[in-house]
Image (spheres, rainbow, N blue to C red):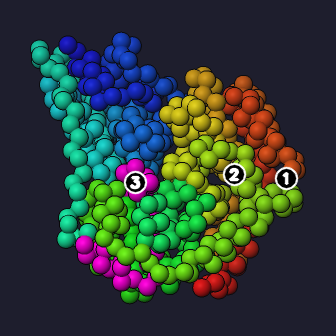
Amino acid sequence: MKAAELFIKCLENEGVEYIFGIPGEENIDVMDALLDSSIKFITVRHEQGAAFMADVYGRLTGKAGVCLGTLGPGATNLVTGFADANMDRAPIIGIAGQGATTRMHKESHQILDLVSLFAPISKYSTEIIHADIIPEVVRKAFKDAQAEKPGGAFISFPENIAGGEASQGRQALKVQRPLTPEPPKEKVEQAATIISQAAHPIIMAGNGVVRGAASEQLIAFAEKLNIPVATTFMAKGAMPFSHPLSLGTVGLQAHDYVACGFDRADVIICVGFDMVEYHPKSWHESKDKKIIHIDPQYAEVDEHYILEVGVIGDIAAALESIAAQATPSAAENSGELRRVIVEELTAMASDDSFPMKPQRILCDVRTALADEDILISDVGAHKMWIARMYQAEAPNTCIISNGFASMGIGLPGAIAAKMVHPEKTVMTINGDAGFMMNSQEIETALRHEIPIIVMIWNDSKYGLIKWHQERKFGRDAFIDFGNPDFVKYAESFGAKGYRVNAAAELVPTIEQAIADNTVVIIDVPVDYSENMKLTEKLGNLVCPI
């Protein structure tokens, strides 16, 4: 059997549905083997788009998304999306063709040390140096990528190895996934005692709650013990915003209302928290609170994250066990704080000014989308508003690039989300800058008949950078650019395009876009003067409790 054929059979054995990528000279044997495979190859327009698609696929399914490029620039183009997945704990497999092993020892056309290139941004990075090791390499790559905490695995596949023969009898290895162990009994008891003695406990739910499918257990834990819950950007929806114990999202690099709950807390229960989500110094600068760490892995070392107790093991099981032993909190302060948060989030719901305020846009999006629909946020000023104000009701219904925070994820991410959940409406909100970074993938969506809604917040600026510049220097520098006519741009691909010209038009336009059932671009002029108003408001914030 040809090595490339064995490689594809090993991918099939791992349950791979799609490979996102671009064919090249050095991966032609793999491409040819895919013609006889059950795996569907999604030809994209840029390898970065392929990596972002694999990123979001992995995040939504828990199975490693697979992206492929050729050597040299094909591989380097994968890096940004691959790094985003690895830092946001999404399982991803990156595959790149490579020049023949007979020319890798010297200066040669398009040759880079790809294993070393990907090593700092992956859990496992290797090269197939002999056809017979393919089953072991593939099995290890998927095992490492999908193990808690998930991340990236990279495989370099030299062209002469791919085109060669594997020894007779070589076949894919059995897929095995270890169960996450139950948390130690003594640690559960210790955590229950601390929570029972707390005057003002608070829960910070992180990405691990979503990855561990522990949202129901989190809700039950909070209800039984009467403890308010704040979620990180990546855990939005793990606690429904409509729940009376929900405080919304924490993670802004500013003192928001949600931070008031952390100020008063004496015990902070971190559930499935990845430190990359929100640095502890931002919410525990005083270093005087008791921290309970509930996670499948031990805590990262940080002077602001010194634990009172670490409950290591399955998150759902830990929450159930602790809740069964702890005494409910008698604190009654979260109601007033939640009332203030809800009032602020809905205050601009009827603001008719134009260009539209970010708050009004997000209220309208929430109105138009069902609770189970999916919103993918690109990165920019709009991301901060989405993280702060979009009211998610279920896990994985608001996807935000957080750890690596890379612009350009929105459109390709929406394509992957719609492939995973064709029954749901999928929308991505992008700044005009981020949209243009991977807008070529409109053609990919149309070619594969994947209907998505792409909303652009249009201000012809790098708005988030302007926000930071004005905060620090009182002026901006080099943030302006021009845009195409986004409606005509959409139509040039064969997509539909709409431009919103008044606030009252937005909800009907979204409803029409859903009915169109194709790729739709919605151009929404945005008033980012609200950015600095928010900065001033948070700077003068007085906690309501």
Q: Earlier in the sequence, mark 3 or mark 1?
A: 3
Residue 156: x and y in percent read 28, 34
Q: Earlier in the sequence, mark 2 or mark 3?
A: 3
Q: Does residue 211 belong to the magenta stretch?
A: yes
- x, y percent for residue 336: 63, 78
Closer to the chain start, of discs 2 and 1, is 2
What residue is pinned by disc 1?
Answer: 503
Give residue 400's mark.
none
Name the residue at 55% across, 57% down: 240
Q: Residue at x 44, y 23 (%)?
A: 41
Q: Is residue 81 left or right of residue 141?
A: right
- Residue 366 shows which numbered tag? 2
Which residue type carries mark 3? Answer: Ala
Whole-Å distance between the Cαs marked 2 and 1? Answer: 15 Å
Q: State the count of labels.
A: 3
Q: Is residue 449 above or below residue 288?
A: above
Q: Nearer the viewer, mark 2 or mark 3?
A: 3
Which residue is identified by label 3? 214
Q: Magenta residues, as a range?
A: 189-217
The residue closer to the viewer here, 410 or 131, is 410
Query: Which corner quadrant holds the N terminus?
Result: top left
